[in-house]
Amino acid sequence: MKLSIIIPCYNEKRHLSELISLVRASPVKDKEIILVDDCSNDGTTELIRTQLINEVDKIIYHPKNMGKGAAIRSGLKCVTGDMVIIQDADLEYDPMEYVKLMAPILQGKADVVYGSRFMGGGPHRVHLFWHYVGNRMLTIFSNMFTNLNLTDIETCYKLFKTEVIKKIRIEQDRFGIEPEITAKIARGKYRIYEVGISYYGRSYGEGKKIGWKDGFKAIYVIMRYGIFR
């Protein structure tokens, strides 16, 4: 089965070349790499056009910064694989673990697989206590509305059968996409699995972008799609 890898990218000049190399080296033989540049302004766009243009299968350039959700929407229009995974353009997640995430689908057990940073299964950087607490609280709050028992809704690594994610109408433009997709997947009665993954988290000084404002937005999104729809 072919895997489509969507990489939303905004101001990741420092890490993008290494990340693309790691994705290309992942043990999935049949794959396509779709890179979405969300109007970067740190030299990332120039890096893509001069050095990475032949390293990926498809590049989409946003004319203005629109957010992770919008980048994923754009990427989904181009996928040709049987499965789709989201890959952040930093080095927090390990592309070598794609096969671990694909296994439940290949075994015919799952339609959607989340890679959980909190289940164990690999190295996990120890830092940012309050970020950890916020993630756990958002996951519990989401589970209350979806009746799922997930451990990590904010994980980047979400793997879908293409036919499943194509049925989801993604409305959120930014980081609200994580609870939105979870709520809509839960309503669809799909078979959801979690597997433990490694996590090489970075600090805000190293380029981490999500912050406390995104946490409050996530609460709103959980309630919006959990109660009102």
Image (cartoon, helix red, strand yellow):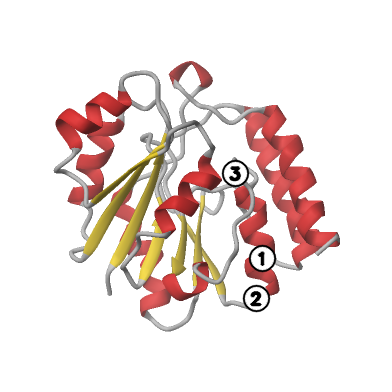
Circle 1 sits on which residue? 184
Circle 2 sits on which residue? 188
Tell me the element at label 2: loop
Q: Is residue 68 left or right of residue 4?
A: right
Residue 184 location, quadrant = bottom right
Callout 1 amino acid: Lys
Residue count near mark 2 (Cα–Cα under 10 Å), binned few <14, some 14–19, many ≥20: few
- Sequence order check, earlier mark of 2 and 3: 3
When the figure is inspected, residue 108 is found, relative to residue 229, above or below; the finding is below
Give residue 112's position: percent from left, percent from top: 51, 69
Q: Is residue 62 left or right of residue 228?
A: left
What residue is at 74 percent from the left and 49 percent from the top?
A: 221
Tell me the element at label 3: loop
Circles 1 and 2: CB atoms closer than 8 Å:
yes
What residue is at 47 percent from the left and 45 percent from the top?
A: 71
User: From mark 1 to mark 2, how far is it between C-alphas?
Assistant: 6 Å
What residue is at 59 percent from the left and 47 percent from the top?
A: 154
Circle 3 sits on which residue? 173
- Sequence order check, earlier mark of 1 and 3: 3
Circles 2 and 3: CB atoms closer than 8 Å:
no
* Viewer-nearest residue: 124 or 103: 103
